Image (cartoon, grey):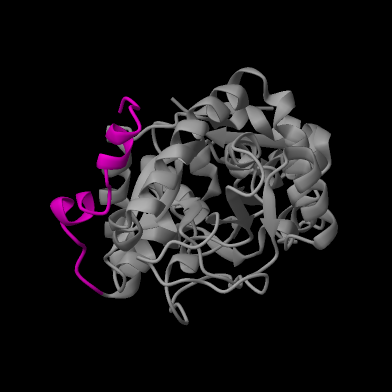
Amino acid sequence: MAIVDPRPNLWTRRALTGAALATGATLATGCASRPVAPHGVASGPLRIAARPDVLEVGPILHAAGAMGAGRVVVSGGGVPNLIDGPVAGAIDSFPGRADAAGQAETQLLRLSVANPDLRIVMTVTEGVYRIVARRSAGITRVADLAGKRVGIFERTSAAFFLHRMLDHVGLGDADIVRVALRPGDMAKAMIEQRVDAIAIWEPESERAVRALGADAVTFADPDVYREFYNLNTTAAALADPVRRAALVALMRALVLSCRISAERPGEVWPLVAASSGFPAELVAAGWPHHRFPATLAPALLDTMVAEERWLAAQDGRAPRTRPELDRLIDRTLLAEAGIRS
């Protein structure tokens, strides 16, 4: 049942310093601080790439701090940082190479076509995205989006969320007027009435709700789509005993950090605010639209199968089969960490 309710920032040095002080974690802006060893050769702390400007990263920041200084380095980035050399199809580029990355299932699906050794080892956060629309544009239900201007960050999980929500009410992607926007531009576009609706993650949807006030209407349905923000790595990293042990330790820490994110989120909000530059009260307002499972749910593969069909149609290729996609999920690390799936 649908729920109806009445600047892509880089990780700045100042924000990095604040997050480091708050967590005790080691944080880096790039890879200049030390040489990067090839996979199979352990060198230094575990390197995690994760975008600073999404709320989903909260448990990773908390776990990094809880593990103690020098054990984990968190840098801006995502799945592309798991891959050597230029990455075709990457939306944004951050410097540095990583052992693990936090990012939604969409980007792993996109990039694993050319890099089939990418692996998902845990879902850290589930994001329940929202469509935010203007009532004054005649929108009171999802079906009313037909013919309307909808702001969307193309080639992302938010675009797939919109696709699923439209499909659920019998509409297709061509039934709306798509307006390509970066997340940080969406609230402004709503205020200026350049779009009638947006579909995006937090806290940008919350910004739009606040900007519209009583004119805002929102739509969400986690049974139709919810983001799976995963801890991702590579088969090569899993085959390295030292990196594997470090990943197991991280995953055990993430179980507690996810529990704290759900039950005592006030301990995590300042870390996200420091890393992203978002006001702490905006982080807190967007937090209820997330879940923190710290496991691998069967629904992940179901979502990947549906999303693969959507991506393949965009790329003009045949979709991979369910067994092929299942190979992208490594459950052995979860079992080794003693975490129930």
Look at the picture and state if 202 lies above or below 268.
below
Rendering coords of residue 163 (x, y %):
42, 52
Magenta region's main secondary structure?
Answer: loop
Instruction: Name the one closer to the observer, 76 or 319.
Output: 76
| Quarter the C terminus occupies | top left
The number of discs equals 0
| Quarter the N terminus occupies | top left
Rendering coords of residue 120 (x, y %):
35, 49
Rendering coords of residue 12 (x, y %):
79, 61
Residue drawn at (21%, 63%), measured in percent from left and top? 319
Look at the picture and state if 184 lies above or below 334.
below
Span colored in magenta:
317-341
Residue drawn at (35%, 70%), measured in percent from left and top? 314
User: Does the stretch in magenta take in 319?
Assistant: yes
Say if residue 226 shows up in the picture.
no
Look at the picture and state if 186 lies above or below 116.
above
Instruction: Name the one closer to the observer, 257 or 252.
Output: 252
Instruction: Name the one closer to the observer, 283 or 11.
Output: 11
Look at the picture and state if 237 lies above or below 199.
below
Residue 239 lies left or right of residue 129; in this view the side is left
Residue 148 lies left or right of residue 323; in this view the side is right
Residue drawn at (49%, 63%), measured in percent from left and top? 43
User: Does the stretch in magenta take in 59?
Assistant: no
Residue 266 lies left or right of residue 64; in this view the side is right
Q: Quadrant of the rendered structure where residue 111 is?
A: bottom left
Q: Residue furthest bottom?
A: 86
Say if residue 269 shows up in the picture.
yes
